[in-house]
Amino acid sequence: MRFDIMTLFPELVDGILSASIIGRARKAGFISVNTYNIRDFSEDKNRRVDDTPYGGGKGMLMAAPPVLRCFDHVVADAEENEKRRVIYLSPRGKVLTQKKAVELARFDRLVLLCGHYEGIDERAIDRIADEEISIGDYVLTGGELPACILVDCVSRMVDGVLADPECFENESIASGMLEYPQYTRPLDLDGDRVPEVLTSGDHEKIAEWRYRAALELTKKKRPDLL
Ligand code: 4FM
C-alpha cells in the first residue's frame, strides 16, 4: 500500500509517520509514504500558494494551480491499472469509520490532499478528489493530522503491518463492542485485586467473563455502539 500526501507541512507528517508501528511498517516495506510540498509547485517568485477569495470574506484560500501541478507530479509515475483513490481531508467529508478504513485498505494507492488557511479553491477539489473524508465533527487548523490518522488507521489493516492479524479480528468497534478490561502484574495493587476468574486457568469461564464485561462496558460508556 502506497500513500502520497500533498501538504504545506511535509515535515509534520513525516515526523508522525516515522515513529512506532507505522515507522517500522515503512522500513519493512509493508507500506510506503511519500510527502509532497505543495509550495514547491508555486510559480510565484515568493513561493506563495494562498490568495484572497473572490466575492470577499476573511482569510486566505489555497490557489488551485500549485495544488494541480503537485497532483500531476504525484501521479506522473502511476502504474497502468493501479487502484487509486484521491481523498481530500476536510470537515465537509463523511466521518471516517473502521468500516471505511477496511475498504480503503484494498486500494494500491491513496493520495491525500491536506488543506490549510480557509480552504482550497473548489475547482482544484472538483478536479482531483474522488471523495472527502473527515476524522470527526470539529475543526482543525489543517488536514495534516487527519491525513496521519487516516494513514495510521488504514495501515494497520494492511497485511504484515501488525504482528498478529487477530489483533483486529475481534477488537473493539469492528465487533460492535468495546474491548473487555485487561490487567497485568501486580496481582494486588494496594488491595485492588485482579478479577479472580482471570487467574483461574478456566478458559471457558474467562471468555464468558470477558464477553459480559465488554457488554457492560459498552452499555455504560458507548451505548450508541449497540
Ligand atoms: C481543512 C482546515 C481544510 C483548512 C481544515 C482546510 C478536518 C477534520 C479538519 C481543517 N479534516 N477532518 N475534522 N480540517 O478540521 O478532516 Cl483548507
Image (spheres, rainbow, N blue to C red):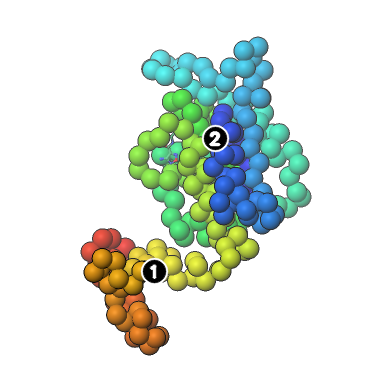
Of residue 52 and residue 226, the one placed in the foreground of this image is 226
Question: What residue appears at the point 45 percent right and 71 percent down from the top-left corner?
Answer: 170
Residue 183 found in image quarter: bottom left
Residue 162 sits above or below residue 82 on the image: below
Foreground tag (1 vs 2): 1
Q: Is residue 112 left or right of residue 209?
A: right
Residue shown at the point (38%, 69%) measured from the top left: 185
| Percent position of residue 21, x then y | 57, 54
Tag 2: amino acid: Leu
Residue that mark 1 sits on: 184
Ligand 1 picture quarter: top left
Is label 1 within 8 A of ligand 1 (CB to nearest ligand atom)? no
Image vertical order of residue 5 relative to residue 45, above or below? below
Disc 1 and disc 2 in contact, CB within 8 angstroms: no
What residue would you read off at disc 2? 12
Which of the 4 image quarters holds residue 106?
Answer: bottom right
Q: Is residue 137 visible?
A: yes
**167 horizontally vs 187: left or right:** right
Residue 39, horizontal then vertical, whole percent? 61, 24
Q: Quadrant of the N terminus?
A: bottom right
Task: Give the x, y percent position of residue 29.
Answer: 69, 54
Q: Quadrant of the C terminus?
A: bottom left
Give me the residue at 36% from left, 69% from top: 186
- Could you tell me how far apart the alpha carbons at marks 1 and 2 are, in whole angstroms? 35 Å
Q: Is residue 124 visible?
A: no
What amino acid does circle 1 point to?
Thr
Of mark 1 and mark 2, the one earlier in the sequence is 2
Q: Which image quarter: residue 124?
A: top right
Q: Secondary structure at mark 1?
A: loop
Q: Residue at x 62, y 17 (%)?
A: 47
State yes or no: Cβ of the residue under disc 2 lies below 8 Å from any atom of ligand 1: no
